[in-house]
Image (tube, grey):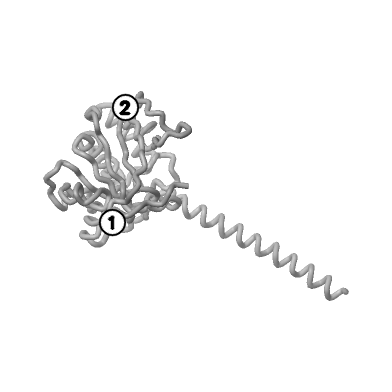
Amino acid sequence: MKQDASRLVMCMVLSMLLAVVVRESLSTQTQQASYPSMAPLSQYLMANRDDEIALARSAAPAAISGHAKILVLGPHGFVTAVEGTNGFVCMVDRSWMSEFDSKEFWNPHMRGPICLNPQAVPSILPIAYKRTALALAGQSKDQILQALKAAFASHPLPPLAPGAMSYMMSKQGYLNDGAVHWMPHLMFYTPVNADWGADQPGSPVMLNTQFHSAPESMNVFMVLARKWSDGTAAPAMQ
């Protein structure tokens, strides 16, 4: 009986120790996933230029991205890798395009293929250029925020053109650690006072807060697509 009791006590102690180890491990993983500052630049760059071009093109169906201008990220910012003919611009966003309150603002794994239509290019592309320039200059998240506020106060973005939108239909993207490539979708850019009934019960429209309360000040409405850019069916959203 004493031996049985001793075994029981030992099992209880081991279980408690295992629970502590698991809890500490999860806590460590959570801390590691917060990305408090920028990682080395090399982690945000893609070693193979052709791979980045292909990833950028995967944002939209080939009929669109195959004739689009393609940008790739270099050590000093985005550069043109392929000239386009249809007015679209495709690129791969990095994590500093996220909301400023996001814990993954500096996540070096983030790769967000996006294709801007001609109406979106004049007002959306300057945001990517500016945020990227500040990030690559070594600015902190708060410094980037303050610099954007100052920049857009003195030189406002061009007004959003009617019909400004973008494609994000890549099956190869990595939007964040939780969503990974999430779902294929279209994004529509509007002034903040536009009301599309987003996030209402039964509405297919979602509001992305990416630029809603940021210095750029605009709505980004998202509508899911049924297929990825390669034509394969997307899974049903849970």
- Kindly tell me whether residue 234 is visible in this rendering: yes
Q: In the picture shown, does residue 85 fall above or below 199? A: below
Count residues near mark 1 (Cα–Cα under 10 Å), then give few for <14, some for 14-19, many for 20+: some
The picture places residue 233, in percent across and down from the top left corner, at 35, 53
Q: Which residue corresponds to the image point at 60% horizontal and 61% vertical from the top-left?
A: 22
Q: Which residue corresponds to the image point at 47% horizontal and 53% vertical from the top-left?
A: 33
Question: Picture quarter containing residue 109?
Answer: bottom left
Q: Amino acid at mark 1?
A: Leu
Q: Residue furthest right?
A: 1
The picture places residue 150, in percent across and down from the top left corner, at 30, 30
Q: In the picture shown, does residue 1 fall above or below 143? A: below
Q: Residue furthest top?
A: 193
How many numbered discs sit on the rendered protein? 2
Q: Nearer the viewer, residue 30 or 36?
A: 30
Left-right relation of 63 to 14: left
The picture places residue 218, in percent across and down from the top left corner, at 33, 30
User: Which residue is the site of mark 1?
Assistant: 45
Q: Which residue corresponds to the image point at 65% horizontal and 64% vertical from the top-left?
A: 18
Label 1: which secondary element: loop
Left-right relation of 190 to 103: left
Which of label 2 and label 1 is nearer to you?
A: 2
Count residues near mark 2 (Cα–Cα under 10 Å), then give few for <14, some for 14-19, many for 20+: some
- Kindly tell me whether residue 73 is visible in this rendering: no
Label 2: which secondary element: loop
Q: Nearer the viewer, residue 68 or 79?
A: 68
Question: Picture quarter containing residue 43?
Answer: bottom left
Alpha carbons under labels 2 and 1: distance apart: 32 Å
Q: Counting residues from the N terminus, which is met first, the one under dot 2 or under dot 1?
A: 1
User: Which residue is the site of mark 2?
Assistant: 191
Q: Nearer the viewer, residue 234 or 48?
A: 234
Classify the position of the N terminus by image quarter. bottom right
